Image (cartoon, grey):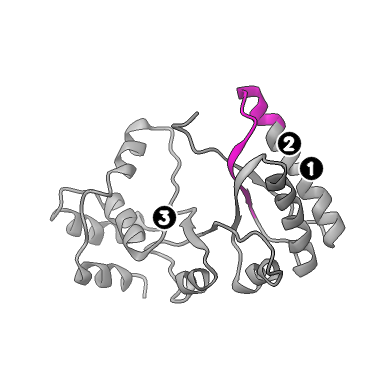
Amino acid sequence: RDELYICGTVLSNRVNGEEAAYKKTAQGCLENMQAFSAGKIDKLDMIMLDYPGPNDESVRGQWKAFEEMKTNNLVDDLAVSNFSPAQLDAILVNPSATKPTVNQLPFSVAFHPRDILEYNAKRGVHVQSWSPLSRVLGRYGTDLASIGKNYGKSAAQVGLRWIVQSGASFCTQSKSKSHFEEDLKVFDFELTSEEMKRIAQLAA
């Protein structure tokens, strides 16, 4: 267990109002714990809201359920996905609220709005890319592969390294063990500042 970081997810964004969002999210938390109990897992490292509710009251209802899960010692870290600055502030307006550890966003070589890292960092929230190579290799693979030749790295590894050096992290999924291994081999080289700028400008 010590070698695994286990994250659950809850989808409760289609209900409106604080109480309804709280109940739907609490149900999702319970379902997570029931599913993980099959593997004798009784505590998660992180739980993530896949999407924010339709308004501030709904977001606060979602977060109330998450904070109860943490209070009950069922999870260590709370996280969100696809949250805008205003949606983060719906949580953080309460000074006693638990701050989201991570905001998972579609941050990549192909999509990196200028303020996406800044607005999260300002609030003490780490950005993690949930789609790090989407629309990247088909459009910019040749450019990334050219840079990768300098380090013996693939286009995918260069794209992932760019995310890390930008100050974010990433999560990937694959049915191939070799692809997972390749994705992890991005911490033994460093892109130059010129290469970072060149890659950032590809989607400009």
Choose top left, top right, bottom left or bottom right for residue 103: bottom right
**From what the image shows, is residue 173 above or below residue 14?**
above
Numbered circle sitting on residue 31: 2
Quadrant position of the C terminus in the picture:
bottom left
Q: Which residue is mark 1?
A: 27
Q: Position of residue 200 (x, y in %)?
A: 32, 70
Q: Position of residue 33 (x, y in %)?
A: 69, 34
Q: Position of residue 29 (x, y in %)?
A: 72, 42
Numbered circle sitting on residue 169: 3
Instruction: Give amino acid for label 3.
Output: Ser
CA separation in Å, label 3 and label 2: 27 Å
Instruction: Give amino acid for label 2.
Output: Glu
Q: Are marks 1 and 2 in contact (CB under 8 Å)?
A: yes
Q: Which residues are magenta?
A: 34-50
Q: Describe the element under mark 3 as helix, strand or loop.
A: strand
Which of these two is toward me, 142 or 177?
Answer: 177
CA separation in Å, label 1 and label 3: 29 Å
Pick whichever of labels 3 and 2 is earlier in the sequence: 2
Is residue 20 toward the left or the right of residue 125 in the image?
right
Choose top left, top right, bottom left or bottom right for residue 28: top right
Q: Position of residue 196 (x, y in %)?
A: 26, 68
Q: Would residue 43 be counted in the magenta stretch? A: yes
Residue at image coords 45%, 48%: 171
